[in-house]
Image (cartoon, rainbow, N blue to C red):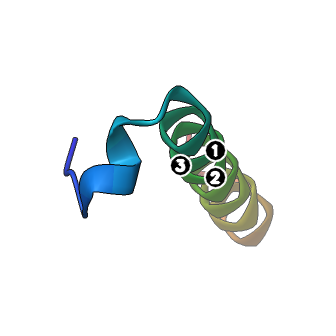
Amino acid sequence: MRLWGPEQFDSNALDRKALEAAVNALSEIWKSRRRTTRAK
């Protein structure tokens, strides 16, 4: 996990970044899954 600045030490900022990262990862997984139905 990267710390971009002092504001990152705020729990709310960390939670927000973690949520954004998780949502982005999930959306990427679903996008690739939709494209390639054969791939697991």
Comparing 11 with 33, the one in front is 11
Task: Tell me if mark 3 has few (under 14), some (14-19) or many (20+) residues whose alpha carbon lies within 10 angstroms of its own.
Answer: some
Q: Residue furthest top?
A: 11
Comparing 30 with 10, the one in front is 10
From mark 3 to mark 1, how far is it between C-alphas?
4 Å
Which residue is label 1 attached to?
A: 16
The quarter of the rendered structure image containing the C terminus is top right
**Residue at point 70%, 48% (across, down):** 23
**What percent of the width, then of the height, locates residue 25?**
56, 51
**Residue at point 74%, 54% (across, down):** 30
Instruction: Relative to 15, say whether 38 is above or below.
Output: below
Q: Residue furthest bottom?
A: 35
Which residue is label 2 attached to?
A: 20
Task: Tell me if mark 1 has few (under 14), some (14-19) or many (20+) residues whose alpha carbon lies within 10 angstroms of its own.
Answer: few
| Amino acid type, label 2 | Glu
Helix or strand or loop: what does disc 1 sit on?
A: helix
**What percent of the width, then of the height, locates residue 8?**
36, 47
Q: Residue furthest right?
A: 34
What number is the disc on residue 33? Answer: none
**Residue at point 48%, 37% (across, down):** 14
Assess whether mark 1 and mark 3 are in contact (beta carbons under 8 angstroms). Answer: yes
Which residue is label 3 attached to?
A: 17
Assess whether mark 2 and mark 1 are in contact (beta carbons under 8 angstroms). Answer: yes
- How many labels, in total? 3
**Residue at point 72%, 58% (across, down):** 27
Assess whether mark 3 and mark 2 are in contact (beta carbons under 8 angstroms). Answer: yes
Left or right, 25 with respect to 19, comes to: left
